[in-house]
Amino acid sequence: MFRTQPKLLISAAAAIALSAQTACGGPAEPLISPVKLVFTVQPSDTVAGATITPLVEVTVQDAFGNTVTSATHSITLSLGTDPSGGAATLSGAGPVSAVSGVATFSVSLDVAKTGYTLAADASGLNADTSVAFDISAAPAAQLAFTVHPTDATVGVTVSPAVEVTVQDVLGNTVTTATKTITLSIVAATDPSGGTATLSGGGPVSAVNGVATFPNVSIDIAGAGYTLEISASGVMPDTSATFNIEAPAVPTLQVIASGLNSPLYLTAPPDDTTRLFIVERGGTIRVVRNDTLLNAPFLDIQPLVLSGGERGLLGMAFHPAYATNGQFFVSYTGLDGSTNVVRYLTSANPDSADELSASQIFNTAQPFSNHNGGLVTFGPDGMLYIGLGDGGSGGDPLGNGQDSTTVLGSLLRIDVDGGSPYAIPADNPFKGHPTAAQEIWAYGLRNPWRYSFDRLTGDLYIADVGQSAREEVDFQLASSAGGENYGWNTMEGTLCFSPSSGCDTTGLVLPVLEYAHSQGCSITGGYVYRGTQLSGLTGHYFYSDFCSGWVRSFRMENGVAVDERDYTALFGTINSVASFGEDARGELYIVSLDGTVYRMVP
């Protein structure tokens, strides 16, 4: 490759001529003749197989190394002989007149061979001289890989983005490259005996020096080896490696037991030492560093009507909890209504100030079931409130398709913008003459659990079905809201009212559903974004309250894919009431029987 070096000074042998004595017999007077040329060539090294443009300066000097500024010589460059038999051409070689003793050449050398020394000669003085510089045998181009992600997990199909860039040896992209590049997997020893296959590996033409492989898919069937991708088409062929991790098989670890009907688990933002567990009867318990504290964080049992689908149902920490100490709870009041109340923490971070209660929201509930009850802050900083259709069976009041009531809906309010709250300016029914302006989405039967993907902001709603279907609804983070998820016109993808021939215009169908032959009541969870189980990243977890299995899927281009069942690993879990997520993104499973589990490798 090119190497920047100090100026190269090479001179011929010096010769000094002395004049004869003067005619009058006086002493002899030495005369200094300009007898040599000194070359400066940068760069002094170059690469075969490319055109280079070194700067060549030729300086006329006397025998003592002084520049002969009065020199008027005309100087021409030429090429030396290539011993390997190659050919090189030179342009811009002159002749050039030396100005103040210096002749400067902007030459171009087209080097068509490797491994020889190139000599530039100059003539025009009484002692011609030359300078040589190396032509290295390094190639004119190479490949540079960009592979993301750099790590993958065995047992799954990964789709890394692969870019292959044609570069010269200085690392500059050769934008004129027209090479066609093909990827392949280099055989690597897998201690588990597995194999890996690649699709979408080309051939691909390099555009402006870059070949992009957007649809590479690597199916990894083994465990614990390093995968190497190679590309051919440029001299030399080259490769890049990235790690294949041994699969982390999830299992369950009990972190708390003996709880009183726990329904939910959450954690304050950025608090990696504590978990907060909501008990249906009206208390919130703290787990600090995996130890359940004796004293409750909050105890509002005298205010709560508990039993069945009623009770203290949800808790949400304000995004700025670390500075403002605010958290919100949702519970069934003694009159059966839904209440959302703001509290403050006390000077003791493990104890709330029960006298700080400030009611934010209240709505009557016509029946004892389908109260919803989850509250959570979205990535937009707004508070979301899930409400069922009001209860009984089959939605007798028609609340699911009635936008004038908040029941059967997911609400979105701004708890910082007004007293007790404000309607966000971009709510879909803001300013509507009849609709409840708090509504973000509707057509829901009982959105017992919903969650936002902490990475993408996408919304997953697990809506409990009637007698035939359980469903998961999905909303992209870019949605403007206003979705109608169909209840009670539809139950999942089936017509409900009427039982056939229903009008599905404008309804958003679920991305996943299952029949009651597999369960009776869906319990929604979260998209896994933790670090302990990288093979599960991007999977949305859910369970069934009756059947006790745990399953997951990923969303890809609006479709649920890669469905998995964890029964072989977890067994069945009694009465899964909720999932939970800690500040690190690790997942928990809450059983109504009093046990909380963490998913661990």
Image (cartoon, rainbow, N blue to C red):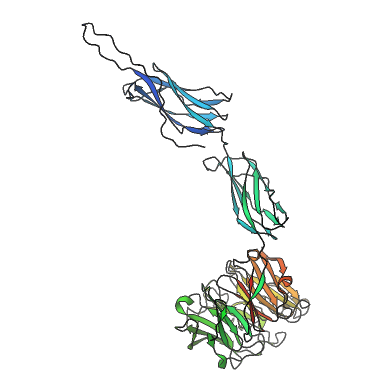
Q: Is residue 195 above or below residue 402?
A: above
Please tell me which residue lies in front, 563 or 134. 134
- Residue nearest the viewer, comparing 568 with 374: 568
Which residue ends up furthest to the front in the rendered image? Answer: 191
Provide residue 157's location: percent of width, then percent of height: 69, 59
Q: Quadrant of residue 218?
A: bottom right
One can see residue 395 in this view: yes
Location of residue 340 in the rendering, given as x and y in whole percent from the top left corner: 55, 85
Q: Position of residue 52 (x, y in %)?
A: 50, 33
Q: Is residue 6 above or below residue 146?
A: above
Picture quarter containing residue 545?
Answer: bottom right
Residue name at image x 29 percent, y 11 percent: 19
Q: Quadrant of residue 462?
A: bottom right
Query: Is the residue 12 above or below the residue 568 in the image?
Result: above
Figure check: 102 above or below 530 = above
Query: Looking at this view, is 196 or 484 the one in front?
Result: 196
The x, y position of residue 392, in whole percent, is 70, 88
Residue 386 showing in the rendered view: no
Look at the image and tell me in which quarter the C terminus lies.
bottom right
